[in-house]
Image: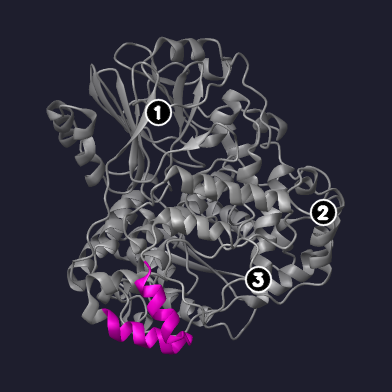
Amino acid sequence: MDFLILPDHPAAQDLVARTPALAAAEVIPHASGRPWLLLRPLWTAADEKAGGEAGGRGDMERPGPGTRPGPGTEEGAGGRVRVRVFGSGARRLAVLGHTRPSAERLQHLLDQAGSLSALDHAARSSVGCCHLVASFDGRVRAQGTLSTARQLFTVRVAGVTVAAGSPAPLAALTAAPCDETALACRLLTPYVPWPLSSRSVWRGVRAVTPGHWLELAPDGTARERRWWQRPAPEVPLSQAATAVRDALREAVRVRAGAVGTLSADLSGGLDSTSLCFVADDVAATTHTYHAVPLDPRNPDHRWARRAAARFGPTVHHTDLPHDHSARLFGLATGDPLADTAGADEPDGGEGPLNWRWGGPHLRALSRTAAEAGSRLHLMGLGGDELFGPLPNGLWAMLRTEPRAALPQIRRRQLLNRWSLPATVRGLADRSDFPEALRGLAGRLTGPPPQRWQVGFGWTGESRMPAWSTPEAVDLVRGALLAEARAGTPPLDGDRFGHQALEFLAVEGTTIRQTARAMARYGIAWEAPFLDDRVIEAALSVRLSERMPSGRFKPLLTAAMRGVVPQEILERTDKGEFSAELYEGLARGKEAAVEMCARLRLGARGLADPDVLRTALLSPSDEGRYAAHLESTVAVEAWLRSPHTDPAPLAGSGPTIPLKEAS
């Protein structure tokens, strides 16, 4: 969903007037009459090169140009904007996305608020997943969600700060070139750590920090203000479980009320299965889909069939057979040197895709679900991060619940074969976040950590692939050291809280990218576990009850008791998908090797084509090989797409570096 947010400033009005692609947009004005929200999807250079299909934008039903959509405008197929505007005069609040706002309550908040900060209550009480944007006596407050499933980006243009729900329109507006450092960071595996993960692949385009709202002042400057703090993990399991159950029910109910028919993954795992039964519980018409595993011994298929047999009349299930023609990360053989922006190439307006590997399956599923009548697909992203054990949870628990922590530490020590001295050193470590960034900068090309190595630090142990060039490594190392020198704060003052929010932001980016890439098929993709209220409920539970020994996701299990059949909640085994991985690697090897002939990453000095080709012909048995390959192919495919260097929108002005207001 592309939209722009403008400050109440004459330069913003001039920018719209002299940029035809903006002047044709639907406008919601400030009280001054100047443009505040531009809601029409922007026609970027990437769309033009792709034949106008990117994002499926051509068939959106909208009000005419220059008009204000009325309250209740729906978001339907493919990301059609659902916006509701409350208030009048100098104080207005727009809600974009899936939520259930109370007009009377929001009007009261607007009337009583003495400042933009007083709208924190509206942010803390909203359900679902949405952007909130307020125009308040000439000042603007805008925010996304904690997980970044709804995110905001900014850029300075024509002397003012402009914000958007996606980096793509801002990059097109300023003709922003690629950020080589950000591209190098995307090669990190298994994930890009905070704050490097927030770095846009276009220079000058910046992401707003999770838990903060963006203020656009009347003079065109901008600053971030924190509005959210992680709840203290003090709530008993039974109470937190009730809060999680209520939040999930409301999350699914809101989406069903907005679009009617839903669809959902039913992998057989607890996360997706829980969402399917919540949809059943609230009587939402839902089509569930299970991708049949290649390995017949994979228990996920058996558990998915058991779940499907217990659904009520509003839930309809379909098994999807394994597609043996799927290629490595969706690369086609034949002409791997050509641009990949064909009819089936996903929209890259968010940058390289986190889930490049699953692209063919996601596209096929989107078509199938849309044909069945679904307008919104539910995924279980975020379940592992909210309900599973995190590496540094023991470090945090030792400081909040030492008596409960000691037995769990001992069990994990024996299970993972940690040495006692290393365990004690890790638990006693008090290094701060900048120290952690400096430490990671020195380990980028080192061997990956082994299971027996203790890891209670602020950051994960991300590594660069063997085929990355020294120049690429230097760029990433320099970025980490620069953040350390700047004293960039973590997402939370506690290591556990920081890591939870960091991982949730990775998942939020994934669902945001997926939603944009799949929009052309007429279906939205969302992850209810990533809603703010669900996150708050899950993070409030006591750490000792969140990760007790010998129990699998106890908080989610408790929350779903009475919703999910007990036999499914008692499952102890877990599916394994190496068969799909190795088949994809084998079938896609030829295209990937051909890709090395004119590697765009090589032309930019970020990867060595010869080393990559050798790795493809003689695959390593090192566990991260496939993950390294996935991130590399994702960046390479994006570099071949029309999104890489967007041409400027006609009439746009010069870019000015962003400076936060003091």
Tell me, yes or no, if residue 504 can be seen here. yes
Query: Identity of the amino acid at label 3?
Result: His
Residue on which disc 1 sits: 660
Q: Position of residue 267 (x, y in %)?
A: 50, 71
Query: How much space separates mark 1 and mark 3, taking CA atoms?
Result: 51 Å
Q: Which residue is mark 2?
A: 595
In contact (CB < 8 Å): disc 2 and disc 3: no
Q: Which residues are magenta?
A: 405-429
Q: Quadrant of residue 138?
A: top left
Q: Which residue is mark 3?
A: 322
Q: In terms of secondary structure, where does tag 3 sit?
A: loop
Q: Nearer the viewer, residue 105 or 640?
A: 640
Going from N to C along the chain, the mark reached first, 2 or 1, is 2
Q: Position of residue 366 (x, y in %)?
A: 57, 53
The picture quadrant where one finds residue 623 is bottom right
The answer to if 409 sits in the magenta stretch is yes
Query: How far apart, in angstroms, are the residues tagged by discs 2 and 1?
Result: 42 Å
Furthest residue in direction bottom, as rendered: 414
SS majority, magenta: helix
Mark 1 / mark 3, whichever is N-terminal: 3
Amino acid under label 2? Met
Viewer-side label of 2, 3: 2
**Camera sees residue 378:** no
